[in-house]
Amino acid sequence: MLPMGTLITVCMLIALLFSTRLPLLKHIQRLPRILRRVVSILVFAAGCWNILWYAVRHFMEFWGLAALISGLLMLVTSVYMLDAHRLPTLLNRLRPQVLLLLSGCAILYGVTLYRM
């Protein structure tokens, strides 16, 4: 069984792959809509778990705050993947910053897991 930190890190990386508009990754945007929806729901569920289970239980600790931040970023990113037009224009303008912060969280989680 995989530890939850590993699963959350993989979900962050998948979210970055599916929501990035880089020219090298444009073929991911052409995948079937049902697959993109399933991935979006998976990322949304991981974000909810990060916020509602881990962050609430460990709120005043470093990893609790990291779970809160990365969970919120995953929730926004899941909507980017599903239907970005439903978000306010401010969040659509902040897409590069949100993805940059999410990649920072993924790197933090990944390096920590590697060192364990």
Image (cartoon, rainbow, N blue to C red):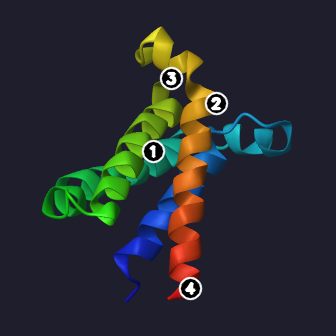
Q: Residue at x 38, y 82 (%)?
A: 3
Kindly state the secondary structure of the residue where label 1 is placed. Answer: helix
Q: Earlier in the sequence, mark 2 or mark 4?
A: 2
Residue 115 - label: 4
- 10 Å neighbourhood of mark 4: few (<14), some, or many (≥20)? few
Mark closer to the observer (1, 4): 4
Badges 2 and 1: C-beta atoms under 8 Å apart? no
Q: Secondary structure at mark 3?
A: helix
Decide which of 97, 18 is in the foreground and name it: 97
The residue that appears at 58% across and 52% down in the rendered structure is: 104
Q: Nearer the viewer, mark 2 or mark 3?
A: 2
Amino acid type, label 1: Ser
Taking 55 as reference, is 36 above or below it? above
What whole-number distance in Å separates the C-alpha atoms at marks 2 and 1?
18 Å
Three-letter amino acid code at the position of disc 4: Arg
Quadrant that contains the N terminus:
bottom left
Q: Residue pushed farthest top? A: 89
Mark 1, residue position: 40
Q: Nearer the viewer, residue 115 or 84?
A: 115
Cβ–Cβ under 8 Å for marks 3 and 4:
no
- Amino acid type, mark 3: Ala
Evaluate if marks 3 and 1 touch, with contact meaning CB atoms under 8 Å apart.
no
Q: Mark 3 packing: few (<14 Cα in 10 Å), some, or many (20+)?
A: some
| Residue beneath disc 2 | 96
Task: Count up the numbered dots.
Answer: 4
Image location (x, y in percent) of residue 67:
34, 57
Specify the quadrant of the image occupied by residue 115: bottom right
Which comes sooner in the sequence, label 3 or label 1? 1
Q: CA distance from mark 3 to mark 1?
A: 12 Å
